[in-house]
Amino acid sequence: MTGAGARAHVGITCPSDHPVFGVVGDRLVERGHDVTYFDPTVDLDRETLAALSLLVVKQTRPASVRAAIAAEHLGVPTWNSATGVVACVSRLSQLCLLEGVGFAVPAALPTPPAGDYVAKGRYHWQQSPELNGEGDVYEALLAEDPVDHKYYVVHDGATYRTVVLRATSKLWGEKRVLGAVEPVPEHVERITALMARLGMRAMGVDLVHAEDGWYAVDLNPCPSFAGTGLEGALVESIEAWLG
């Protein structure tokens, strides 16, 4: 970490015009830091990583995950731990992690179950979940025409900040945000417990309400935070890591 008030060099793996992290980067520059945006699909060499004060993995792709691992090997801090990111990018490990903190999760199957189902790729960066499609992992459909409760959580250096957006599921067409709702405290406690275990500063979890209760159906180790209004909290979070 850098000393308090010191100029830092922050690397972020996403385009500079990202609707949230572009704003975050601009505010970090206004506070006296240097910010470099990296293509998440391109591998970063040791010299580039070693010049950073902090690496922020925003878009998870194989190259950006490798960058996080390499940065930690070099002793370069990562905003979301490389261990945490690696643990969260597999659809199967996501479900295990979520179940481990008390969430009900859908069963992940190697072949389609009877009835309607959701097909997913094995890794976070692969295909979007598809209704009755082809994939590597299959889950029974939990609710007809579901609405996702998208939990966005960030640790701002002092406390966890949470925003929950209701949105129509992309399984049924283009996603539409329906508005913000109050978080369920029990859900937040489970998410923050998982973040603490993995050394994560941010996380997104999608929950669906089925006939028999709540299910956690997706985990994003590097969410976009679009529409949450948490840009200020993200800036504070990154600066808190810088010390």
Image: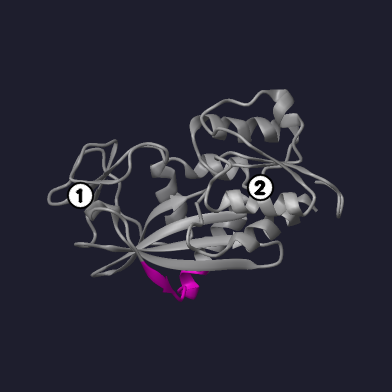
- Tell me the colour scheme of the image: one colour
* The magenta stretch spans residue 22: no
Q: Position of residue 132 (x, y in %)?
A: 18, 45
In space, the residues marked 2 and 1 are separated at their CA atoms by 35 Å
Which residue occupies 79% across, 44% down? 8
Which residue occupies 22% across, 37% down? 134
Please, what secondary structure does the residue beneath circle 1 have?
strand
Q: Is residue 102 visible?
A: no
Mark count? 2
Residue type at mark 1: give it: Tyr
Which residue occupies 61% across, 66% down? 160
Nearer the observer, 17 or 195: 17
Q: Position of residue 60 (x, y in %)?
A: 50, 39
Task: Tell whether 6 sits left or right of 90.
Answer: right
> Which quadrant holds residue 217?
bottom left
Nearer the observer, 124 or 59: 59
Does 141 appear above or below 54?
Answer: below
Task: Tell whether 182 sits left or right of 170.
Answer: right
Residue type at mark 2: give it: Trp
Q: Nearer the viewer, mark 2 or mark 1?
A: 2
Please, what secondary structure does the residue beneath circle 2 have?
loop
Q: Earlier in the sequence, mark 2 or mark 1?
A: 2
Give the magenta part as a residue range. Answer: 178-188
* Residue matched to label 2: 79
* Residue matched to label 1: 117
Q: Position of residue 76 (x, y in %)?
A: 74, 37
